Amino acid sequence: MHGYISGISFFVVILGAFEVEDDSVFCEMLGSPELPLLFKKGDITIGGAFSIYSQISKSSLSMTEPPEPLKCSRINLREFRFAQAMMFAIEEINNSSTLLPNVTVGYKIFDSCGSTLPSTHAVMDLINGQKQNLVKTCNSQTSVHVIIGASESSSTIAMLQISGIFQIPMISHFATCACLSNRNEYPTFFRTIPSDYYQSRALAKLVKHFGWTWVGAVRSDNDYGNNGMATFITAASQEGICVEYSEAISRTGSTEQLERVVRVIQRGTARVLVAFLAQGEMDVLLEEALRQNLTGLQWVGSESWITSSHLANTRFSGILTGSLGFAIKKAKIKGLQEFLLQVHPNQDPQNNLLREFWETTFGCSFQSRLHGTEQCSGFERLQDANNVYTDVSELRISNNVYKAVHAVAHAMHSMFKCGQSGEAVNHSCTLMDHLEPRQVVKHLQDVNFPLQSGERVYFDKNGDPAATYELVNWQRNPAGEIVFMTVGSYDASLPNGKQFTMNVMNITWAGESWERPLSVCSERCLPGFRQAMIKGKPLCCFSCVACAVGEISNSSNSAECSRCLLDFWSNDDHSKCVPKVIEFLSYGETMGALLTAFSLLGATLTLVVFFVFFRFRHTPLVKASNSELSFLLLFSLILCFLCSLTFIGQPTEWSCMLRHTAFGITFALCISCILAKTITVVVAFKANRPANTVPQCSASLQRTSVLGCTLVQVLVCVLWLVFAPPFPHKNAAHATEIIILECDLGSPVAFWVVLGYIGLLAVLCFILAFLARKLPDNFNEAKFITFSMLIFSAVWTTFIPAYVSSPGKFTVAVEIFAILASSFGLLFSIFAPKCYILLLKPEKNTKKHMMGRNSRPHIQ
């Protein structure tokens, strides 16, 4: 077919070359014109090309004989009604006193047979004209001023290749190919049916609306089907729809090819079939589908067949019931039914078309009875017939023909300046002697008028009308007949989101079910899963993979999972992000409660020891223990126990700064007191030896040493707080599903300096206490200090690796444990022996007992 159109294009170039030189050559090339099927003379003549016959005979090809001419047969009642609608509109205009007054409009109607070659013959006959005696004539002007037709896009293109040379405007009522909107190629083309550019996209949106992502496709192998399906596939891809297969058929194709296409459809997994077919291809496809018992499909159709009454019969109802598709809006044409019922063979006894129409309608024959066929009497009544021709309840394409004729009339009315001569309107037209086709084109482009129904007719810059459709659904009425129910509409001029209006509740689906069919390659992925491509498969075929931890998909069929924000985590279903659990060592949990209890216990015991020492402050034991340093040491130990409480609870800016500095300063004070006590003990006992004259340390020196050692730590802490203080920090890196609320050290160097300084003081205490290990047994406090420093050093030495390796809140627990363990160690090591004597062995709390070893004679 495409090759044939290319041949026509070549032929057109030749015609164009001869046009200006010799019209007789053109006449010779056209040959003898044929008589039109329907004809009427007029001041202006409108040509018509309809597929009145729908079956083309297949001639046998031979290498020795020329091929027989194509013969068209089997009258198409629907197309015959289109032709009658054109004649009715012309009669209506001729009877009008306001539209083209005193001007008669004639017509010439030829058969295009729904094929390119007969359409080419038709347009040649329309251009060349004829006389009743078939004498060859060829005038400089064509015999028609406008052509209405054809009913197929390919036929229309073939006709335009020739008529376009002479700039004869064509108005199609049924050619929907988007390619015809190209004004550069087809500047004289108009149509009263929307372009498939809009219908194809509307079909893609319709399929997407119902969630069908896996569809099959079949198309006519011509310009209509190929262009329409290409646009649909492109739009479907943009909507995320995959086409499992796309097959093309032709009504003149081989039976084997048709059988193969039906097998492909039957074996496919798609449950929705988008059929972009002309009526001829739909007829042959349904015949083969019926033969192979093709059922269970949801058909989505184009406007070409979706409202075709002859398909809505009992024979095909099992296949097509529930079909959906877009159709041209139906209309009422007043007086058309009466006009259609007036047709009778007696109107023109020589017209074979009228006789064939009558015979087809009533199943009779005007010839002698053949093969049991009843003979036509001529008295049959069309009112009693019930067929596509007499049914005016679904006037859609017929209304397009009606609009096309009126558009021509209004263009001519404007061009002839009807009713505008003189001051008063005289209701007449001034006919032009020489009517230029390009003028008709110009005035057609400018028409804008309303019909009696209120519908406005106009063309855009591409010669197209407004793209509005009805969504039609095939349903059964109570009588069991198939009816076309309007269940929605589509208006391409509206913005996205408002183009569709639809009542889904009123739709009947394939198999006369009220449940919408499912047509997907893969089942939908639930929230919490994502689609994973399957190698070698289309995008719509996928497997569902669970989202990784920390990722979610909150809708079905998510292409990918989205990661939760830093403070959120995926729930168990991976369908939504939930706030992460914030973890810190709280008072309410078991570990926090236990540490709090031990901290308060330690502070209480230290306070008890403090009161015991205060009660026995005048006794020799307390005095010998340097009561001032002992009380200061006990006070610092109370602070050490209590400072551990600052590590428990939700970290805040103030608690973070307090916990580390309080810990550093209180322990520095504590160890400074022990260091001063150790120095005092060592110096005091060395001074009491006969050979030694070193005086005892004064109380002021003790205070100074304690204050000095503590101030160093205070200075370090102040610098730490000023330049890089600790602050609360949400640690999401250590554990993915929780947030550890902790105190960032700010400056790790400052922390380790604080800790190192306490360790330095402890080492000094240990060294001095070790030097005093041989002091008298009755009062060997240095021995207890040495033991306490060993415990202190052991605790904090094991603290370092445990602190570094402990996760989350256990880091804080380790630090608290180290504080409490070292504090308890100091308390029990230094003060437990003294409390034992004070409370349980008061007889040893004497000066004599304290100095007992020194009073013994020195044995040489």
Image (tube, rainbow, N blue to C red):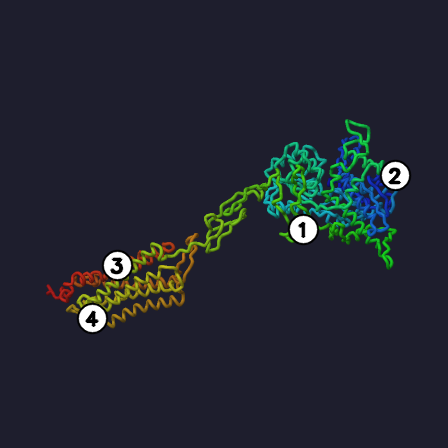
Q: CA distance from mark 2 to mark 3?
A: 133 Å
Q: CA distance from mark 4 to mark 1?
A: 107 Å
As displayed, is residue 613 above or below residue 154? below
Q: CA distance from mark 1 to mark 3?
A: 90 Å
* Label 2 packing within 10 angstroms: few (<14), some (14-19), many (20+): few
Secondary structure state at the residue bearing disc 4: loop
Disc 1 to disc 3: CB gap under 8 Å: no
The numbered disc on residue 790 is 3
Q: CA distance from mark 3 to mark 4?
A: 27 Å
Q: Where is residue 653 drawn, in percent x and y?
A: 40, 63
Q: CA distance from mark 2 to mark 1?
A: 49 Å
Labels in figure, total:
4
Q: Where is residue 602 drawn, in percent x and y?
A: 28, 60
Q: Quadrant of the C terminus?
A: bottom left
Who comes first in sequence, dot 3 or dot 4?
A: 4
Who comes first in sequence, dot 4 or dot 2?
A: 2
* Residue receiving disc 4: 696
Amino acid type at mark 1: Ala
Amino acid type at mark 3: Leu
* Residue receiving disc 1: 492
* Label 3 packing within 10 angstroms: few (<14), some (14-19), many (20+): some
The numbered disc on residue 134 is 2
